[in-house]
Structure formats: C-alpha cells, structure tokens
Amino acid sequence: MAERKAQTSLEALQSRVASLPSPRNFFQAVVAQGSPRQSRVIAEVKRKSPSAGLIRADFDPVDIARRYHEAGAAAISCLTDEADFGGELGFIERIRDAVPLPVLRKDFIVDAWQIWESRAAGADAILLIAECLTEREIVDFQILAVELGLTTLLEVHDVESLYRVQPHIGFPHPGYALLGINNRDLRTMTTSLAHTFRMVDMIDDRSIVVSESGIRTAEDLRRLREHGVHIALVGEHLMKQPDPGAALRELLNDR
C-alpha cells in the first residue's frame, strides 16, 4: 500500500477520475427484478486463490469476460490482488473495453486512496470486507464510494460481522449498496450454501443480498431463490471449466 501511494499521488488519481465518464451502474445490473425464477450472476475472473492454488493456466481475462457476457452474466468481478490471486489492476480497463458489463474490483480495500485508485482504473464497484475494516472505515468508505458513483459490495463472513455492519448497510444511499454473504469458512476453507440460508433470515431486504462461494449448479441458484436470494457471485467453479462461458450458460439454464 505504501509503495503504491508513493508511486501515484492522490492528486494524480483525482485528476484522472475527473476526466473519466460516469461509472456503469453495477447495482442496477445485478439487483433482481421481474420473474421470481430469475437469478443474476456476477461472474468472476480469477487466475488463482489461496484455497485452490492455480485455477487456470491458460488465463486470458478479456476472453473470459467476453464468454461470460455472451453467456448471460449480469456483471463481472475481477480479482486485482497480485500476490495471492494473480490479478492486476489493469485487467479492469481491458475488460471494460471489451464488454458492456459493469466491473467489480475485488481486492482488499483498507485505505481511501484505493477507492480513488479503483475509480481511476475504471472500476464500477468495489468490495469492502467487513472483517478487514472498522465500523468507521466502512461508513467513510461507503460515503466516498457514493461520491465517486461506485457501488459497494459489503461482504461478511460470520454472524458477528453481520450484526456489526447491519446499521450501516445502504448508507448513505441504498441504491449503491449490496450485502455479500461469503459461504467460505475461513477456518476450514470449506463452503456451504447453508451459511447464506442461516444468515439471510437476519436481513430485512434480501433483494440486495449476494451469495458468494460454493455455487456450482442451477439447483444451487434455485435453492438460493427459495430463500429470497437472487444474486450470486461465482468464480472458482466457472474458472475450472474448459469453457467458462458454457459453464455459466449451463448454470443459468433454468432461468
């Protein structure tokens, strides 16, 4: 973080942002509307992960994003963390130039400077991980994101974090805020949809809930819909398939 800030000043980022067109509306793209049988998938572009290791050797983020778009993805999630996920910040602009879908920068956001960096890089949304941030940081980061026109995906892994962030969900503007429930147990690295099913009962507005991790089949999406959850973020399963686009099309085949 210190190295990146030393290379690029906040003023330089702000100047870059001032010259950019408005972000694409990530929130509108993924919030479920219409048929109760409809799910919307945020399809993820990811080379590797700490839990799975190298997921895809023949990794071309632009080609993968194009396949996702053709298969019916509502939006794209792009890993930009380099050390653990093999990502690059430059992937975002390349993907946005290739497809009309809004793009989420998925990374560890711990400083307001990174939010400006995300906007300058062309991101339409950012991930905020509740377990990594204080309540004050969550509030401040959400305010800045709204000022920059970015949607926030506020992710929680456990019930304690959900209770902590609930008063701040949708602040300062509900049309820019999504709530992610990560189904991965960070102690065992296993995933279970039951985690979403348990936690969603504590959430008043299920239309903004995104279930993340462990989603592999059309049946998984159907079970989520039965619990009022119409948005899913899917990455590892799609990235492991020979054709990620065909895998997404199969996932969505009961829409």
Image: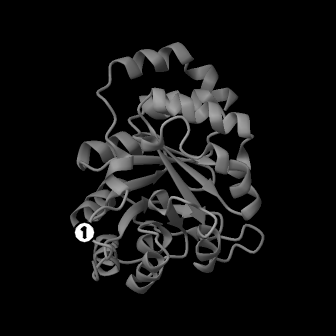
Query: Looking at the image, can residue 87 be seen?
Result: no
Check the image and report above or below for 75 versus 196.
Answer: above
Is 180 situated left or right of 223 in this image? right
Query: Percent x, y for residue 251?
Result: 35, 79
Q: Residue drawn at (31%, 57%), measured in percent from left and top?
A: 65
Query: Looking at the image, can residue 232 be seen?
Result: yes
Is 248 situated left or right of 206 in this image? left
Q: How crowded is mark 1: few (under 14 residues within 10 Å), some or many (20 or more)?
A: some
* Nearer to me, 202 or 255: 202
Farthest residue, direction front: 204
Query: How many numbered badges does the structure rendering display?
Result: 1
**Quadrant of the rendering where the C terminus is positioned:** bottom left
Is 152 situated left or right of 168 in this image? left
Image-quadrant location for residue 148? top left
**Helix, strand or loop status at disc 1:** helix
Check the image and report above or below for 43 versus 80.
Answer: below
Image-quadrant location for residue 221? bottom left
Q: Residue drawn at (65%, 39%), measured in percent from left and top?
A: 138
* Nearer to me, 172 or 70: 172
Query: Percent x, y for residue 97?
Result: 26, 42
Is 142 situated left or right of 60 in this image? right
Amino acid type shown at disc 1: Ala
The colour scheme used to paint the residues is one colour
Check the image and report above or below for 64 versus 100.
Answer: below
Residue beneath label 1, please?
A: 71
Query: Percent x, y for residue 84?
Result: 63, 55
Check the image and report above or below for 64 versus 62.
Answer: below
**Quadrant of the rendering where the N terminus is positioned:** top right
Q: Residue drawn at (47%, 26%), measured in percent from left and top?
A: 147
Q: Residue drawn at (33%, 49%), measured in percent from left and top?
A: 28
Query: Percent x, y for residue 203?
Result: 59, 61
